[in-house]
């Protein structure tokens, strides 16, 4: 699959632009703030019907305008497919495939698989456990719809249990049997989620490690560890042990909604002890491992968006990454950079054909 052409109208700072793309490597070069990332976001939008960067849909309409339209021409298994996504202020977003509007956008997700690597991924290292859970949950859900259903059900039971704990506190009452109904559901769903996360990470981690070793030239040791209260204690038992605390704080303090991933370099947290380049390498390796999973799951080679990845990385890491993605396992790639010469130099070394767009 590849994106042959995109037309952008009134999207962020882009008034109107059309690009004909190369089947393999496309680079956007230009000064800060010119709109390189916005073009990648328009491509992302056609796959996911939303922005990677700005979740408030109307804020993606160009200032002073009342609508945006994105139109993409794809080649999928030698067939032409046209995707149009548009949004008018005060109206619902419209997503069309070959002229036919989708009723549910979720039917479109996964049809045009895509992975983006961007400086915004830094949140995975710097932010709380919620961001990291969302990342693995997103990767697992793509290949396992039962997991997604269990996760939604689990979160609903946590909310209901929390509401009950608040009710107990507000009314100075307690009903152990009532709470037990929720505990049983939580245990059932929680254990399933825990086991799936464990299985997934045992497959994912070696792939991630392999990518990191390639990028760093085997220079440093990294670890990706799954942290869960369920490693040591049975979930039902955990819930029983925490009843008093839960009643006091009025929410559920134990369970898989507290799981986290620990990102380490040489056995120390990368957040505190990794250099900016090492953190960036770690995130790129995570996303490239995600790419591999998505590819297996969808049987289509995803599009890869590399936003500003050269910054903070030394030449050897940049070369390793480009070499890594410049083979038959990867398909179409879009790269942004502020330095035209740097991009040209790196890409020319690969002997791959490419297109550079000066913005
Ligand atoms: N809704 C909008 N309307 C108009 N301009 C917008 C809108 N949303 C974002 N922008 C503008 O888009 C510009 C940022 O574009 P973008 O992030 O694509 O730049 P870039 O070329 O990737 O820059 P850098 O090299 O710094 O990463 C900013 O000037 C921002 O104000």
Image (cartoon, rainbow, N blue to C red):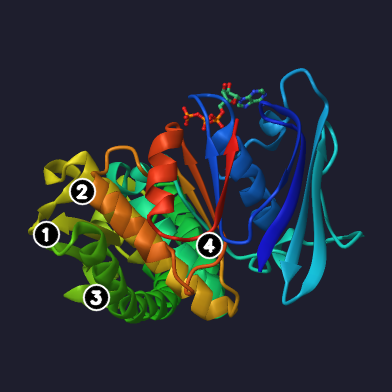
Locate residue 168 relative to residue 201 in the image: left or right: right
Task: Bin the neighbour count of mark 4 within 10 Å (Cα to Cα): few under 14, some 14-19, many 20 and up.
Answer: few
The disc label shown at residue 156, or none: 4
Q: If you read the primary sequence from the N terminus, does the residue marked by circle 4 or circle 3 appear first?
A: 4
Q: Are marks 3 and 2 in contact (CB under 8 Å)?
A: no
Locate residue 255 relative to residue 91 in the image: left or right: left
Task: Bin the neighbour count of mark 1 within 10 Å (Cα to Cα): few under 14, some 14-19, many 20 and up.
Answer: few
Q: If you read the primary sequence from the N terminus, does the residue marked by circle 2 or circle 1 appear first?
A: 1
Say which of marks 3 and 2 sits in front.
Answer: 2
The answer to whether one can see residue 44 in this image is: yes
At a point 55% along the width and 53% down the height, the residue shown is 354
Q: Quadrant of ligand 1?
A: top right
Position in image of residue 224 (x %, y %): 22, 64
Q: If you read the primary sequence from the N terminus, does the residue marked by circle 1 or circle 4 appear first?
A: 4
At a point 44% along the width and 76% down the height, the residue shown is 189
Locate residue 84 relative to residue 331 in the image: left or right: right
Label 4, secondary structure: give it: helix
Say which of marks 4 and 3 sits in front.
Answer: 4
- Determine which residue is flagged by label 1: 220
- Measure the alpha-carbon separation of dots 1 and 3: 39 Å
Up-down relation of residue 302 to residue 144 (above or below): above
At a point 27% along the width and 55% down the height, the residue shown is 282
Position in image of residue 213 (x %, y %): 21, 65
Label 2, secondary structure: give it: helix
Task: Bin the neighbour count of mark 2 within 10 Å (Cα to Cα): few under 14, some 14-19, many 20 and up.
Answer: many
Say which of marks 1 and 4 sits in front.
Answer: 1
Position in image of residue 162 (x %, y %): 43, 54
- Measure the alpha-carbon separation of dots 1 and 4: 41 Å
- Determine which residue is flagged by label 2: 278
The disc label shown at residue 237, or none: 3
- Measure the alpha-carbon separation of dots 2 and 1: 9 Å
């Amino acid at each position: 699959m590849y994106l042959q052409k995109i037309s952008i109208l009134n999207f962020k700072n882009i008034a109107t632009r059309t690009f004909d793309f190369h089947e393999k490597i496309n680079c956007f070069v230009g000064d800060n703030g010119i709109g390189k990332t916005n073009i990648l976001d328009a491509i992302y939008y056609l796959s996911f019907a939303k922005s990677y960067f700005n979740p408030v849909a109307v804020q993606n309409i160009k200032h002073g305008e009342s609508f945006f339209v994105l139109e993409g021409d794809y080649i999928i298994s030698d067939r032409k497919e046209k995707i149009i996504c548009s949004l008018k202020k005060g109206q619902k977003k419209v997503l069309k495939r070959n002229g036919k509007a989708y009723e549910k956008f979720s039917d479109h997700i996964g049809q045009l698989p895509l992975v983006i690597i961007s400086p915004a991924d830094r949140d995975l290292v710097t932010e709380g456990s919620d961001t990291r859970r969302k990342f693995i949950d997103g990767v697992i859900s793509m290949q396992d719809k039962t997991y997604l259903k269990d996760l939604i059900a689990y979160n609903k039971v946590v909310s209901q249990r929390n509401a009950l704990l608040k009710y107990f506190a507000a009314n100075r009452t307690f009903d152990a049997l009532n709470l037990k109904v929720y505990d049983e559901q939580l245990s059932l769903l929680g254990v399933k989620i825990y086991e799936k996360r464990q299985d997934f990470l045992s497959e994912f981690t070696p792939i991630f490690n392999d990518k990191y070793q390639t990028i760093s030239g085997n220079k440093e040791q990294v670890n990706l560890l799954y942290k869960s209260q369920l490693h040591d204690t049975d979930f039902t038992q955990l819930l029983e042990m925490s009843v008093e605390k839960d009643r006091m704080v009025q929410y559920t303090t134990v369970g898989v909604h507290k799981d986290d991933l620990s990102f380490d370099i040489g056995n120390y947290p990368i957040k505190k002890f990794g250099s900016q380049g090492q953190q960036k390498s770690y995130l790129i390796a995570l996303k490239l491992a995600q790419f591999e999973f998505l590819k297996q799951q969808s049987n289509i080679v995803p599009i890869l968006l590399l936003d500003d990845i050269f910054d903070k990385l030394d030449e050897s890491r940049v070369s390793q990454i480009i070499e890594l993605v410049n083979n038959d396992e990867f398909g179409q790639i879009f790269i942004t950079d502020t330095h035209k010469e740097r991009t040209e130099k790196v890409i020319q070394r690969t002997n791959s054909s490419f297109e550079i767009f000066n913005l």
